[in-house]
Amino acid sequence: MKAIITTKYGSPDVLQLRNVEKPVPKDNEVLIKIYAATITTAGTMMRTGYPLIGRLFMGLTKPKNAIAGTGFSGKIEAIGEKVQLFKIGDSVFGESLFHFGTHAEYVCIEEEGIIALKPENISYEEAAVVGDGHITSMNFLKKLAKIKVGQRILINGASGSLGTAAVQIAKHFGAEITAVCSTRNLELVKSLGADNVIDYTHEDFTNNGKTYDIIYDTVGKSTFAKCKNSLTKNGAFISPVLSMSLLFQMVKTAIFGSKKALFSATGTLPIETIRTFLIEIKELMENGQLRSVIDRHYSLEQVADAHRYIETGHKTGNVVLSIKKK
Ligand SMILES: NC(=O)c1ccc[n+]([C@@H]2O[C@H](COP(=O)([O-])OP(=O)(O)OC[C@H]3O[C@@H](n4cnc5c(N)ncnc54)[C@H](OP(=O)(O)O)[C@@H]3O)[C@@H](O)[C@H]2O)c1
C-alpha cells in the first residue's frame, strides 16, 4: 500500500511517499481502507520532534511509528477473529492516537479503540477530522472547564480546528460565546453560533473591560497573566498549547487564588474517556448541532505542501488528506 513514511524528525522534506506492506489485523483489530485522514497543527509539531517532551510518546531519536497521521475515516475491509463490535463493510471514523499510521491506504485499529460508525449524514472528509478539534475541544470544555448553561466564554483562535469545534460545542452546552478571530473569519464564527465577535486585528480582548467565566485560548497566543483581569472571580484560563508560563501558572493557581490556569494533553487520557467524547460528538453531528469546517484537501503526494500550509498558522478549521480516489 502507499503510505507517508517519516524515518527522522525534521522539515516537511522528511515526509516520503513509499510503498509498504499492507497491515494485517490482530485478533482484536479491524483493517480499515482509509478514505480520508486529517493533517493537523499537532501533526506538524510531531514531525519536527519539538517540543522535546512529545518524544516520550513518539520516539526519542526518531518516530516510533514511521507512518504519521492519527485521525481517519474509511470502510472496514477485514476483521480479526475475536472482533464483535464491527463487521466488514462498516463505514467508520476515529483516532489512532499514539499508534499513528493513518497517512496511508490502510490502518489496523483495535475494536475497543477510538472508533465508531460514521454518521450517515456527513462525508468521509468531515468525519476524518473529528479526532483533532472536536475531541480536544470536547475535552477542554466539558471535562476540564466543566462548562455550564449561561456561562460566558471567550474563545481565542475561534477560526482554527479547535476553535471552530469549540464555538459549536459551547453553544450546545448553552454558554454565551465571544469568538476572537480576524476580519476574514468573522462571518464564519457567527454562523457557527458565536453571540459576539472580536476582530483581533483591531481590538485586544484583554483591554476592553469585559469578563468571562472561561477563556479558551485555543492557539496559545495569550497567557493567564494577560487574561487574569478578564476572568470572573472563579474564572478559568484554559489552553491546549503547553508552555513554561502556562505550567508555572497552573502550579501557582492550584495553590493560590480563585482564578485557575488549566491544561490537558487529550491524547494521554484513558481510551474509554476519549471514546465517550467521540460518541457524544457523533450524536451531535447526527442531529446537526456540530459540523466540521474544512479548509483545504490534499492528496498523499501533496502531504509536504499541506504541512507547509498549516505551518503558516492561518488555516481555517481543518485540513484533509483525501486518500481513496473518487
Ligand atoms: N493539548 C491538546 O490536547 C491538543 C490537541 C490538539 C491540538 N493541540 C494544539 O492546539 C493548537 C491549536 O490548533 P488548531 O489546529 O486549532 O489551530 P491553528 O492551526 O494553530 O490556528 C489557526 C487559526 O488561528 C488563528 N489565529 C492566528 N493568529 C491568531 C491570533 N493572534 N489570535 C487569534 N487567532 C489567531 C488563525 O486565524 P487567521 O488566519 O484569521 O489569523 C487560524 O484560523 C495547536 O498548537 C495544537 O498543537 C493541543
Image (cartoon, grey):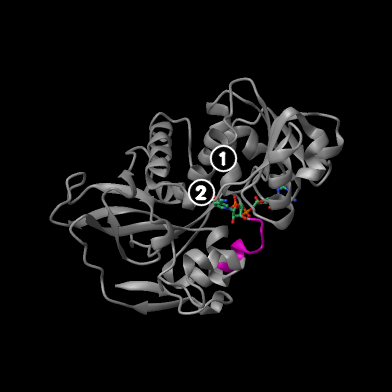
Horizontal side of 76 relative to 226 (left or right) equals left
Within the image, what quadrant is residue 186 found in? top right
Q: Secondary structure at mark 2?
A: helix
Horizontal side of 52 relative to 30 (left or right) equals right
Q: Which residue reaches farthest top?
A: 150
Q: Which residue reaches farthest front?
A: 255
Picture coordinates of residue 272, whole percent (x, y): 37, 42
Picture coordinates of residue 64, whole percent (x, y): 42, 72
| Residue 181 visible in the snapshot | yes
Q: Decide: few, some or many residues near mark 1? Use Cα within 10 Å; few <14, some 14-19, many ≥20.
A: many
All told, the count of numbered labels is: 2
Horizontal side of 227 relative to 261 (left or right) equals right
| Residue 306 visible in the snapshot | no
Above or below, 316 relative to 60: above
241 magenta-colored: no
Asked if the residue at label 1 sits under 8 Å from ligand 1, the reply is yes
Picture coordinates of residue 303, whole percent (x, y): 49, 69
Q: Secondary structure at mark 1?
A: helix
| Magenta region | 307-314
Residue depicted at x 46% and y 73%: 63
Asked if the residue at label 2 sits under 8 Å from ligand 1, the reply is yes
Picture coordinates of residue 151, whole percent (x, y): 65, 24
The residue closer to the viewer here, 23 or 26, is: 26
The residue closer to the viewer here, 8 or 204, is: 8
Amino acid on which the number 1 mark rests in the picture? Phe
Residue depicted at x 52% and y 62%: 43
Within the image, what quadrant is residue 180 found in? top right
Residue depicted at x 23% and y 56%: 29
Horizontal side of 286 relative to 173 (left or right) equals left
Q: Which residue is mark 2?
A: 266
**What's the mark number on residue 140?**
1
Amino acid on which the number 2 mark rests in the picture? Thr
